[in-house]
């Protein structure tokens, strides 16, 4: 349960982590004076992001060795955006849980071609067996 809570918490707090890295990095690049705790926070944020991105890339490479290193670069560059989209989805889920806790936001799917062969369409002239 702690692991699951950590995953959800990391999804919800990722934008805060990313924003603090961007704000403190831009501030230090433009010569703004940061306090010592802000430098520590920036360092800790960068270490966390580095470890998280590296762990995911290592796991991904180990799971798909045939893909090679050329696809790994694409994945590495897309990770921040992908995780941001996951965070947006998590915040949307929290909002829907608060707003409509009993609503199931189910994705509509079309019937598959293999299943469509077994399903007869009902028409107005079709007789319903008793």
Image (tube, grey):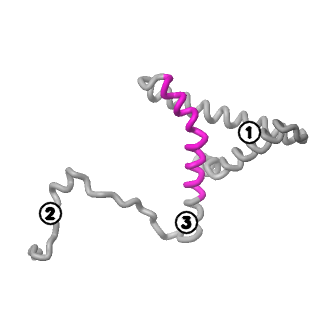
Cβ–Cβ under 8 Å for marks 1 and 2: no
* Residue 37, placed above or below residue 69: below
Mark 2 = which residue?
120
Note whether 44 is above or below 118 in the view shown: above
Q: CA distance from mark 1 to mark 3?
A: 29 Å
Q: Is residue 41 left or right of residue 102?
A: right
Q: Residue at x 57, y 32 (%)?
A: 76
What x and y, as percent, mark residue 13? 67, 50
Q: Position of residue 87 (x, y in %)?
A: 59, 51
In this figure, which residue is indicated by the disc labeled 3? 96
Instruction: Estimate the spatial distance between the alpha carbons at disc 2 and disc 3, rounded to whole Å.
Output: 37 Å
Q: Which residues are magenta?
A: 69-91
Q: Secondary structure at mark 1?
A: helix
- Circle 3 crowding by C-alpha within 10 Å: few under 14, some 14–19, many from 20: some
Q: Nearer the viewer, residue 66 or 4?
A: 66
Label located before the other in sequence (2 or 3): 3
Residue designated by label 1: 45
């Amino acid at each position: 349960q702690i692991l699951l809570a950590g995953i959800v918490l990391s999804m919800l707090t990722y934008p805060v982590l990313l924003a603090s890295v961007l704000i403190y990095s831009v501030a230090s690049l433009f010569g703004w004076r940061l306090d010592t705790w802000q430098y520590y926070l920036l360092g800790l944020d960068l270490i966390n992001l580095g470890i998280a991105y590296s762990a995911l890339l290592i796991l991904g490479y180990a799971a798909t060795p045939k893909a090679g290193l050329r696809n790994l670069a694409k994945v590495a560059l897309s990770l921040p955006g992908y995780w941001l989209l996951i965070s947006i989805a998590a915040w949307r889920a929290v909002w829907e849980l608060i707003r409509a806790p009993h609503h199931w936001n189910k994705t509509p799917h079309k019937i598959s071609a293999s299943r469509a062969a077994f399903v007869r369409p009902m028409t107005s002239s079709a007789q319903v067996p008793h």
